[in-house]
Each structure stands twice: as C-alpha cells, then as structure tokens.
C-alpha cells in the first residue's frame, strides 16, 4: 500500500512549522528527512511538528520521530509537537518522547510558548 | 486459541501486506464498540492490534506475499480476546522492555517498540502461543 505524506514548512517568527499531512509510519522516512534537511539548511533553531489529529502513527513512525529528536538534540534545536489526539498524547508520554519534546494542545499555544522560550 | 467460530466470534484473514493492518484496526474497533467498550479503550485496542499485525507481517511471516495474517476476536464474560496469528515460528527472544526505555532515554530508535506498546495498552498479553497453523499473540482487554 503506497503511502504519501506531504510536509509543508512554514516559518512563523522564530519557529519553523512542519505541517504533516497523513499517517506517520516507517514509510514517512523520506518525507520527514527531507523536511528536516530543508529546515536545518535554512538555520532553524525551533521546530514545531503539527500532526493531523486523525493520523495513524505506528511504532515505525515513532522510531522515526525518536531519530529526529536525536538529530535536533545534536543540532541544538528545540522541538515542539501539536495536533495529537488524546490517545497519541498518551502514547508519546508512554514511550518517553515527552522528555525531549513538549506537547502543546494547540498550534497557537505552541507558537506562543516556543517563541517565548530562549 | 479459539477452537471453532461461534456467534460471538469474528475472524478476518488479511494478506501479508503492510498497510492492511488498518483493516484489522478498524474491524477490532467496530467489534469493541458493539460490545460496549469506551472510546479511549478502543483507541488502545486499535494500536495494539495494528502493532501485533505489523509484527506478524514483518517478523512472523517475514514479508512473504503468499502468507496470511488471521485476526480472531471473541467476547465472553466481559472479556475481549484477540488472537493475531501468523505462519512463523514465534518470537525467539522477546525484547527487553527496560532496554527499550534506556534506548529512548539515549534517543536511539529501539527494536521491539511494538511489543512494548501492546503490553502497555492491553490488560493481558501472551506471546508465543503455538498452534498447528503457526504462531499467535493473544491479547486480552476487560470491559471495566
């Protein structure tokens, strides 16, 4: 089953917003990597990952996000997450992603919070 | 393992194809909804069923396109029991869940994240249920 993601990058103040359309699985790797490379090439220090609330995220997708978190840590970038359903907020907390990335309830709350943090 | 199908049992045969686990997710969600589970628990079930199917497709059936994954669900005594069966030999070494936590702590993508999620989300799990047709994972969720 072919899976296509669309990741749209938008610069909002100091934050680069990753608008992730579609499910997040192992098949998302090229899309996430390309988006991250583009953002890093333009020197971003703050990344907000916005998922679709109905998105299906499986262990393959979670493993990719952990790899992305490792990259952002290495490059001294701050990362935030928004758009998750309550279920995936629970899953992300369960697997420990929240130790490295803050989850915000809304896009606006995330942009405000991340813009204020140094 | 369910011996025969009765009026409280649903069985679905899936092709061994990544992506088709979504059929198992939606089927298990429909079944759980019919028997009265709350939406939060249904989301837990969907994730556990998806991960069990992915393990069956990738590891149990080793990606073989001619293999099948069988999902069997029954509800008795306020208990939903789900079997996900593949044609493999079982899991020779179950992932160490403490090691998974440590890997994530060090931001290294862990192996066995699927089985970790299954164990966290279901009330009871048994891996390596061997039958004459192959291997099954048994997952139980109680209606509380």
Image (spheres, coloured by chain):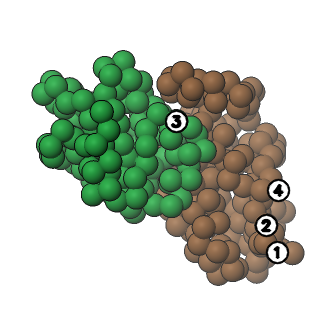
Q: Is residue B73 above or below residue B98?
A: below
Between label 2 and label 3, give the one nearer the viewer: 3
Evaluate whether residue B55 shows in this view.
Answer: no
Nearer to the camera, A83 or A29: A83
List the residue tagged with mark 2. Answer: B142
Q: Nearer the viewer, mark 4 or mark 2?
A: 2
CA–CA distance between discs 2 and 3? 31 Å
> Residue B1 bears which disc, if any?
4
Q: Is residue B43 visible?
A: yes
Q: Are marks 3 and 1 on the same chain?
A: no
* Towards the viewer: A78 or B92: A78
Task: State the SS at label 2.
Answer: strand
N-term mark: 1 or 2? 1
**Which tag is nearer the camera, tag 3 or tag 1?**
3
In green, which chain?
A: A
Residue on which disc 3 sits: A99
Give the residue drawn at x 52%, y 36%. A99
Around disc 4, counting alpha carbons within 10 Å, would you say few (fewer than 14), some (14 to 19), or many (20 or more)? some
**C-alpha span from label 4 to label 2:** 17 Å
Q: Disc 2 is attached to a residue of which chain?
A: B
Which percent across, then down, holds residue B41? 64, 66
Residue depicted at 64% across the width and 28% down the height: B100
Q: Which of the marked residues, 4 or 2, is nearer the chain's N terminus?
A: 4
**Badge 4 and badge 3 both on one subunit:** no
Q: Secondary structure at mark 1?
A: loop
Question: Sequence order check: which comes first, mark 1 or mark 4?
Answer: 4
Q: Are marks 1 and 2 in contact (CB under 8 Å)?
A: yes
Q: Point out the frontmost of discs 1 and 4.
A: 1
């Amino acid at each position: 089953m072919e899976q296509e993601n669309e990741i749209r990058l938008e610069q909002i103040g100091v934050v680069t917003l990753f608008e992730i359309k579609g499910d997040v699985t192992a098949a998302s790797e090229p899309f996430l990597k390309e988006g991250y490379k583009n953002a890093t090439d333009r020197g971003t220090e703050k990344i907000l990952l916005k998922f679709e609330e109905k998105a299906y995220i499986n262990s393959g997708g979670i493993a990719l996000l952990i790899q992305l978190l490792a990259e952002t840590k290495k490059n001294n970038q701050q990362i935030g997450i928004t758009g998750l359903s309550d279920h995936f907020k629970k899953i992300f907390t369960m697997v420990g992603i929240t130790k490295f990335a803050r989850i915000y309830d809304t896009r606006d709350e995330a942009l405000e919070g991340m813009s204020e943090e140094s | 393992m369910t011996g025969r199908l009765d009026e409280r049992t649903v069985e679905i045969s899936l092709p061994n194809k990544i992506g088709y686990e979504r059929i198992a997710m939606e089927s298990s969600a429909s079944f759980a909804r019919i028997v009265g589970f709350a939406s939060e628990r249904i989301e837990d079930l969907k994730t556990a069923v998806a991960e069990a199917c992915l393990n069956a497709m990738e590891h149990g059936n080793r990606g073989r396109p001619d293999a099948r994954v069988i999902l069997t669900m029954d509800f008795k005594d306020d208990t939903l029991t789900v079997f996900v069966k593949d044609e493999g030999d079982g899991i020779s070494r179950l992932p160490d869940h403490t090691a998974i936590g440590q890997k994530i702590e060090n931001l290294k993508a862990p192996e066995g994240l699927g089985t970790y999620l299954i164990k966290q989300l279901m009330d009871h799990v048994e891996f390596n249920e061997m039958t004459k047709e192959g291997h099954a994972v048994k997952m139980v969720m109680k209606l509380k």
